[in-house]
Amino acid sequence: MRLATPIGPRAQRTEQIILFRVSGQLFGVSAASVQEVRSVDSLAGSAADISSPSLQKVRHIVRRGDTSLFVVNGALHFGLPVTPGTLVFVLRRTRTALLVDGIEKMSTMTRLQALPQAFCHEERQWYRGLTAVDQGVIPVVNPDGFLTAEEVALLEESLILATTAKTDQTRQMELLQ
Amino acid sequence: MTFPAERGAQSFVLLRLDDRRFAVAAVHIAELVSPSRIFRFPHRTEKVEGVILRRGRIVPVCDIAETLIGKSFQARRFYLIVLRRYATNAEWVALPVTGECELITAEMTTASEIDAPYVAGWISHDGNVIEVLNVGMLTPGPIESEALNGAFAMQGAP
């Protein structure tokens, strides 16, 4: 019998994290996994609506060259009351742009404890683990945990359908003229 | 079948929920913790209220009262820290209890098939018959661990 040991306790490896709020709840995300932080207003020009009835948490996309980033509403993702998000985190090496309420502060994480096994549902995908900051406990989000491969496929399908419908509409308009 | 006389006496911690008492094998209990701040964050696992910080570890708080007495137990805030077995390791879980816990020695009768899954056995104390809890079946965890915990229950361990 052995007790589960926290991740990486031997060497004092530190990691910069961004503490951010969604609907009043504090979360952490590794600063290294955030490519950009943008205000919602600054993205308005490059954003478009997307509708996927089975995936309410994504309502907008942001065009980035050839690719599209899916804007995940943090409150809907975590099942929290919806608040008007003000910032978007573009998450590195993912198709996710995360809509959050605001940044609390930057902090240094010295120890990340694996999520206890008592937590056995979707949260295991959501979080890399838990960390203690300022005598509190903060869940550290997993950048890959906001959209599954199936959800990305579903969204891409919606995107193709929307593009096709728009092209058809344009052609009809041209024919009418 | 194992008879009490063959097993010998073991130590148990008696805990009280409302007006009922339950027992947990003492070897699986780390400590009784005074009221502590509970930290909550979004998740989807029922019966887990949040976590507490204890000796540098983050310990999940699992509400067992709903299953045992049919209602959530609010008048509490002591935590019995128990070692919970999983398939590959064991972790601490915090069970909310009143501060009224008692260490006793008794002989356990192993549970039968008709008992609830969370009952590991029975002990007799002060003229009462008290359920010995199988913590593995009372607290959430990965599904693959349930069979293992069932096996432990048959051996009288939580």
Image (cartoon, coloured by chain):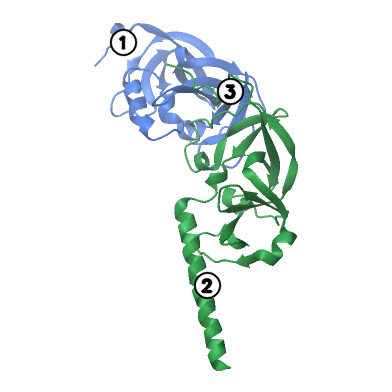
Q: Which residue is mark 2?
A: A163
Picture coordinates of residue B34, whole percent (x, y)? 64, 20
- Residue located farthest toward the front when viewing the structure as drawn: A65
Point 48% across, 71% down: residue: A161
- Which numbered tag is attached to residue B79? 3
Mark seen at residue B4: 1
Q: Position of residue A114 (x, y in %)?
A: 54, 30
Which mark is first along the chain, 3 or 1?
1
Q: Residue at x 57, y 51 (%)?
A: A77
**Which chain does blue denote in the image?**
B
* Front-most of residues A25 and B34: A25
Residue B74: x %, y % from top left: 60, 32
Dot 3: what SS?
strand
| Numbered disc total | 3
Callouts 2 and 3 in the same chain: no
For the residues labelled 2 and 1, the Cα–Cα distance comes to 73 Å
